[in-house]
Image (cartoon, helix red, strand yellow):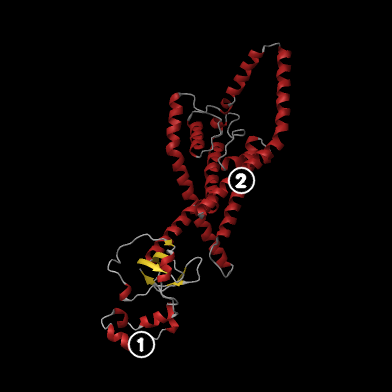
């Protein structure tokens, strides 16, 4: 099985296992708390109905009004500032869900806008991430030169450390600012920054949704947008170093296999005819290097091919597919006994007189090749 297929199957198994483990942990952490919150809300609902003597239907209406009015506490969501904030969440795939289009035109334009905007945003953040990594490499190299280090080149581990530090500082600084403006705890602010920069965007905590902040605090709106864009660029730099390296591994392996296959095809030599080995088996055709000795599986005999003119056929240009087959029993009796090459006495002068025009004897190196390579005789039928 190919390495790419093994890697893909392994990733699928690991991902499914990771999902199962995560589901079990979340179940253990959140299920009891969810049950208690549900019981508490039911108790409050019954208490309000009894205290104010209202029906369950009226309570549902009040509940709907409270939920629908929540986004309007930030001001007008679809003026330019709010619309720009919404467009940013669409392009970056954060998708808080704090405000959603209500008209058919708005929903249709959101789909068309996302089709073009999401690829554009991914390419932009990827390009910014590459520039950040290049700048980090330049800074690391200058620092190493100033410290008189032996290796001044920035390694991949150095870049990972730098990008990880920048990401941590971005989340820590953004959490401090959001904790001040939104009156959140610092831990909740860190949670919001992480959910935002990883584009998870649950929507349980959304900035700029209190005290008409979209209209009254333009500097805060600008800070929130810059934080999102700059933070996503830093995260893209991290992804460029960590994730994309593993994503392109299959492509690199496929290209390497193709290159090896092309080299093997260029080095392959196709021979015509049936090669009969000493044990009586017939090897229909032989593919390999003329100067290599190839052992057949299940046999201690070796096969080689002679480059003499007498063993060449006229139609050597034709290429066929060959496979090994066992010779019939009666054919084995017709085979001559194999004699090792060291028992032959090779007289070059008499052979040169008989085959004066042969290309074998025109090149004296063939005598050396015959003595060195041929351990057993091979015959073509």
Q: Residue 60 appears at what percent x and percent y? A: 63, 17
Q: Residue 106 appears at what percent x and percent y? A: 45, 27
CA neighbours of label 1 inside 10 A, class few (<14), some (14 to 19), many (20+): few
Specify whether 358 is left or right of 82: left
The residue labelled by disc 2 is 171
| Lower sequence index among marks 2 and 1 | 2
Assign a secondary structure to mark 2.
Answer: helix
Quadrant of the rendered structure where residue 368 is?
Answer: bottom left
Q: Residue 140 appears at what percent x and percent y? A: 55, 61
The residue labelled by disc 1 is 347
Residue occupying the point 50% across, 68% down: 299
Q: Nearer the viewer, residue 325 or 293?
A: 325
Residue 3 in sight? yes
Residue occupying the point 50% across, 54% down: 2
Q: Nearer the viewer, residue 219 or 250?
A: 250
Q: Nearer the viewer, residue 85 or 91?
A: 91
Answer above or below: position of 172 versus 108. Answer: below
Quadrant of the rendered structure where residue 28 is?
Answer: top right
Q: Nearer the viewer, mark 2 or mark 1?
A: 1
Residue 237 in sight? no
Q: Residue 258 appears at what percent x and percent y? A: 42, 58
Query: Which corner quadrant holds the C terminus?
Result: bottom left
Assign a secondary structure to mark 1.
Answer: loop
């Amino acid at each position: 099985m190919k390495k790419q297929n093994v890697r893909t199957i392994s990733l699928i198994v690991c991902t499914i296992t990771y999902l199962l483990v995560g589901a079990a942990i979340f179940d253990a952490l959140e299920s009891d708390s969810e049950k208690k919150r549900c019981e508490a809300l039911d108790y409050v609902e019954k208490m309000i109905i009894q205290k104010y003597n209202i029906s369950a239907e009226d309570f549902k209406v009040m509940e709907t009004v409270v939920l629908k009015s929540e986004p309007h506490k930030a001001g007008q969501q679809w003026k330019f500032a709010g619309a720009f904030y919404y467009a940013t969440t669409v392009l970056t795939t954060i998708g808080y869900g704090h405000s959603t289009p209500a008209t058919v035109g708005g929903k249709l334009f959101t789909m068309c806008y996302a089709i073009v905007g999401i690829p554009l945003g991914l390419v932009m953040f990827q390009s910014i991430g590459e520039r950040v990594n290049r700048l980090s490499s330049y800074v690391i190299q200058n620092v190493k030169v100033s410290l008189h280090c032996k290796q001044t080149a920035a390694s991949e581990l150095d870049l990972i450390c730098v990008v990880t530090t920048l990401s941590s500082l971005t989340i820590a600084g953004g959490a401090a600012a959001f904790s001040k403006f939104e009156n959140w705890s610092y831990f909740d602010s860190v949670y919001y920054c992480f959910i935002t920069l990883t584009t998870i965007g649950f929507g349980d905590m959304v900035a700029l949704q209190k005290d008409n902040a979209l209209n009254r605090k333009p500097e805060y709106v600008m800070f929130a947008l810059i934080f999102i864009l700059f933070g996503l660029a830093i995260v893209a730099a991290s992804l460029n170093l960590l994730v994309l390296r593993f994503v392109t591994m299959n492509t690199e392996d496929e290209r390497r296999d193709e290159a090896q296959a092309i080299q093997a095809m260029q080095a392959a030599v196709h021979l015509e005819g049936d090669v009969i080995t000493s044990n009586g088996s017939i090897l229909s055709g032989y593919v390999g290097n003329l100067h290599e000795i190839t052992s057949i599986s299940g046999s201690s005999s070796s096969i080689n091919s002679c480059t003499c003119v007498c063993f060449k056929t006229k139609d050597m240009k034709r290429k066929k597919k060959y496979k090994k087959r066992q010779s019939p029993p009666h054919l084995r009796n017709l085979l001559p006994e194999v004699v090792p090459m060291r028992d032959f006495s090779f007289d070059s002068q008499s052979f040169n007189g008989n085959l004066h025009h042969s290309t074998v004897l025109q090149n004296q190196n063939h005598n050396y090749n015959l003595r060195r390579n041929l351990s057993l005789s091979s015959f073509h039928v």
